[in-house]
């Protein structure tokens, strides 16, 4: 979760404002939402992902399912794919997740019934960047119709994203080999500070004519973690197909949670629908993204100034909440035990944990770990 | 071409269809008796005062929005368990239970269904009463279980077919799962009397069945939370380690906030810890962790003495209004000159009433009187007001005389 420079959770000012508006609105009640969710939320959420001028939206071939966070959106999508994709109830369709990936991806697709979950190359530890060739090879070798879970931006846990050129290559292979793109978009806006930039890959795939799913989370970019606000965006060939898909997703939702929680969706819908509140929100998002970007550049410059062995440009080239530092398990152990700095054994740090007050200490500690321990 | 060319259009939801047709109707006297939510005597949604107070308190506390634990808000789950089991319950005091927050009743049922599918290896069979809530079947089916039924409702008397139920239950294979509605059976409104519950408990214990209670109306049925939880508590006292799903949608009017809980009564606290760990493993890949808003409101109400007292009064108020509408409907039918026995309307309890009307009669009610209900003759008494009960009685009399 995001932390301020004081190391505190941050409720976005625009969220506080909108919550007050909702509290003061006596016309509102706690009645059930429709099964697929609050209509204003669904439409605005998909619009955020695909863009105001999205041709798919104009063609009315976009559907939306309000879900319990990004996880819930992934699960509804996975349950639908298991029932209806590549035949009926084809649990053998391979599902590919990146190496590494958010560990819950595996569980979501397994619990949805898929029997064959595989990995695709992604992180190159030696060069501390994307293993594009490995990724493309895996796409070439994957059985036709395989499902690929793609991180739309701010890859979790490596922070390493393909460049637009690299996305184009990925898309070309996926199109030729009939592979299904399932985007996980948990950090739109939060990663670069720009909604468009962080949605570039999703929008590119749409423009290339793909039918795809995009699981969106509003936990980070709205700071609404515990309200469970998410949206599954479905892009299809035409309105009729999308309508039928949604009617079946409705049945899946009905036996999972019946209808989604209203509070968080109302906050997001109200914000996105008002030009003024939308601008305020965008400002809040940029505040978060900028702080993380600042911590990245400050950490890197300190390491370079200290002459810490190795290269540290990956700190600023990576994006989002997490960074794969490149520290090995022994160095991580040193950080934890000797310096009381907590990071994952993989060397992953949460950039949100950095503050102007602890930057020096963290940089010095990394320097010690790298020089003392091989 | 599309990946989805072969995807069929899902069948329209029968209950939604009722509301859709109602909305299109221009008759000023129209009545929507399909609605599954409480309405006040003006036919309007009712936000409880204790809920408004709790919301104001929460707003003033300026809490953060950090993720809840996977199992939910601890103050909420503990209070939910205590509400269901009773503060003096040995199972509650000893800690030999686990309660996790669920997405209202449906989500809690689904967690339980998935848990049984994974860990109850003795049987795949879940026995539902005939009839049961329409969503029970697809929930258990999607979780990988098989559905069976036991006799429950007697359409000849519009009441409980107790001997039929006992007969069927006595033949259920050992270690099967049996689902029971704790109170205010949906859709019939027919509940066993306490004497009958005692016999049912003895029988399921003898048959060694796993008991799954669905309690969606505690407090809302009789107006008394202890009375409505009597069956649940009696079963546990008889040594039956039940599993239970609770909903706060109706009794706190928190419908869209999705506040619910799933409980497993265990042998001991250690078993409860192990069960809890497995429930979390099931929940995480569904939605990671539950929504806070409804749980916070419910928790504050249950744990703040003044609010709790106010809530008990309000929930009794809702139950009393429903009971009064039942009484008025019967007396108005008599006034209309109906010679039928309508006693089942006041014998039945909770939001729903199985009127005994046949599909042809229901169709006439819809077409000629703009009175909307489901084809099975089920009405939501919550949709009846002192302003329209006379009209309803008149309409029912016209199609049944």
Image (cartoon, coloured by chain):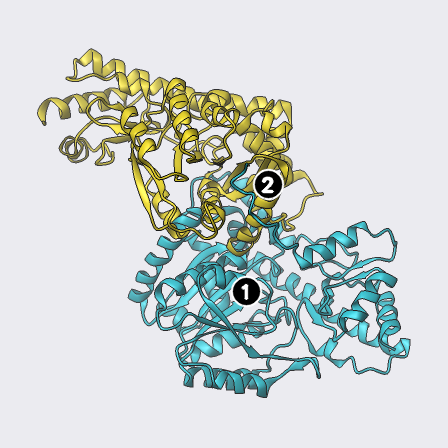
**Image location of residue B26, percent across then percent down:** 86, 51
Instruction: Respond whether the residues carrying marks 1 and 2 are from the same subunit.
Output: no
Numbered marks: total: 2
| Residue at mark 1 | B136
Q: Position of residue B25 (x, y in %)?
A: 83, 52
Q: Label 2 lies in what chain?
A: A
Q: Residue at x 84, y 66 (%)?
A: B364
Is residue A162 something that shows in the picture?
yes
Q: Residues within 10 Å of mark 2 (few under 14, many from 20)?
A: many
- Which quadrant of the figure has residue B152? bottom right
**Picture residue at 40% right of the left edge, 62% below the top:** B115
Can residue B304 be seen here? The reply is no
Determine the secondary structure under disc 2. helix
Give the image location of residue B33, x and y in percent. 75, 62
| SS assignment at label 1 | helix
Camera-side residue: A7 or B3?
B3
Name which quarter of the figure residue B120 lies in: bottom left
Residue drawn at (50%, 54%) of the image: A256
Residue B244's spot in the image, x, y percent?
47, 67
Vertical arrangement, residue A268 with respect to residue A73, above or below? above
Label 1: few (<14), some (14–19) or many (≥20) C-alpha neighbours in 10 Å: some
- Determine which of the numbered discs, if any, sits on residue A241 in the image: 2
What hue does chain B carry in this figure? cyan
Q: State which chain disc 1 sits on.
A: B
Give the color of chain A as drawn: yellow
Separation of marks 1 and 2 at Cα, in angstroms: 29 Å
* Drawn side of residue B144 relative to residue A33, left or right: left
Residue A360 higher or lower than B73, as above or below: above
């Amino acid at each position: 979760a995001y932390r301020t420079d004081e190391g505190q959770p941050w409720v976005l000012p625009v969220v506080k404002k909108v919550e007050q508006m909702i509290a003061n609105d006596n016309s509102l009640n706690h009645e059930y939402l429709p099964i697929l969710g609050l209509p204003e939320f669904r439409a605005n959420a998909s619009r955020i992902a695909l863009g105001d001028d999205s041709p798919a939206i104009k063609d009315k071939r976009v559907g939306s399912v309000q879900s319990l966070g990004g996880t819930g959106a992934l699960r509804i999508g996975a349950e639908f794919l298991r029932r209806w994709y590549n035949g009926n109830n084809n649990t053998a369709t391979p599902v590919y997740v990146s190496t590494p990936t958010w560990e819950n991806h595996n569980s979501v697709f397994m619990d949805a019934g898929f029997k064959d979950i595989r990995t695709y190359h992604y992180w190159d530890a030696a060069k501390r960047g994307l293993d594009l060739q490995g990724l493309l090879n895996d796409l070439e070798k994957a059985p036709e119709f395989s499902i690929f879970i793609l991180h739309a931006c701010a890859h979790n846990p490596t922070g390493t994203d393909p460049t637009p050129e690299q996305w184009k290559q990925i898309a070309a292979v996926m199109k030729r080999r009939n592979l299904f793109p399932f985007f996980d978009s948990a950090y739109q806006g939060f990663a670069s500070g720009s909604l468009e930039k962080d949605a570039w890959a999703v929008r590119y795939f749409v423009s290339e004519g793909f039918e795809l799913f995009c699981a969106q989370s509003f936990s980070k970019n709205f700071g609404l973690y515990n309200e469970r606000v998410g949206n599954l965006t479905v892009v299809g060939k035409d309105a009729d197909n999308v309508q039928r898909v949604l009617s079946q997703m409705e049945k899946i939702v009905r036996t999972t949670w019946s209808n989604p929680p209203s509070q968080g969706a109302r906050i997001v819908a109200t914000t996105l629908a008002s030009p003024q509140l939308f601008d305020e929100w965008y400002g809040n998002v940029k505040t978060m993204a900028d702080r993380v970007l600042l911590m990245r550049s400050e950490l890197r410059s300190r390491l370079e100034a200290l002459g810490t062995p190795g290269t540290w440009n990956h700190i600023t080239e990576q994006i989002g909440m997490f960074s794969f530092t490149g520290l090995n398990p022994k160095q991580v152990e040193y950080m934890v035990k000797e310096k009381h700095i907590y990071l994952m054994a993989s060397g992953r740090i949460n950039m949100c944990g950095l503050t102007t007050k602890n930057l020096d200490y963290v940089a010095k500690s990394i320097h010690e770990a790298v020089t003392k321990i091989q | 071409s599309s990946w989805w060319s072969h995807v069929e259009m899902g069948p329209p939801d029968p209950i939604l269809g009722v509301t859709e047709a109602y909305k299109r109707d221009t008759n000023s006297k129209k009545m929507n008796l399909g609605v599954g939510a409480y309405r006040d005597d003006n036919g309007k949604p009712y936000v409880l005062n204790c809920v408004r107070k709790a919301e104001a308190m929460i707003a003033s506390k300026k809490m953060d929005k950090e993720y809840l634990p996977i199992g939910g808000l601890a103050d909420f789950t503990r209070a939910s368990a205590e509400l269901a089991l009773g503060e003096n319950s040995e199972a509650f005091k000893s800690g030999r239970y686990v309660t996790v927050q669920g997405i209202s009743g449906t989500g809690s049922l689904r967690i339980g269904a998935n848990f049984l599918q994974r860990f109850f290896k003795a049987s795949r069979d879940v026995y539902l009463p005939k009839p049961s809530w329409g969503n029970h079947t697809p929930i258990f089916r999607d979780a990988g279980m098989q559905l069976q039924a036991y006799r429950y409702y007697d359409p000849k008397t519009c009441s409980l077919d107790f001997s039929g139920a006992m007969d069927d239950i006595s033949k259920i294979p050992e270690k099967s799962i049996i689902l029971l509605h704790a109170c205010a059976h949906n859709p019939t409104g027919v509940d066993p009397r306490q004497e009958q519950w005692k016999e049912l408990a003895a029988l399921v214990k003898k048959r060694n069945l796993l008991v799954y209670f669905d309690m969606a109306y505690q407090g809302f049925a009789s107006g008394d939370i202890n009375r409505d939880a009597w069956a649940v508590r009696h079963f546990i006292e008889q040594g039956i380690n039940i599993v239970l799903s609770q909903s706060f949608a109706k009794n706190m009017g928190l419908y869209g906030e999705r506040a619910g809980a799933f409980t497993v009564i265990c042998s001991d606290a250690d078993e409860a810890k192990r069960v809890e760990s497995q429930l979390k493993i099931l929940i995480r890949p569904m939605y990671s962790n539950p929504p806070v808003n409804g749980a916070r409101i419910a928790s504050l109400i249950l744990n703040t003495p003044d609010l709790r007292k106010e809530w008990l009064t309000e929930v009794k108020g809702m139950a009393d209004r429903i009971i009064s509408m039942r009484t008025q409907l019967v007396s108005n039918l008599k006034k209309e000159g109906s010679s039928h026995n309508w006693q089942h309307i006041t014998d039945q309890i909770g939001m729903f009433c199985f009127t005994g009307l046949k599909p042809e009669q229901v169709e006439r009610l819809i077409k000629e009187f703009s009175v909307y209900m489901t084809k099975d003759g089920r009405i939501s008494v919550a949709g009846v007001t002192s302003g329209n009960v006379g009209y309803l009685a008149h309409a029912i009399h016209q199609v049944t005389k």
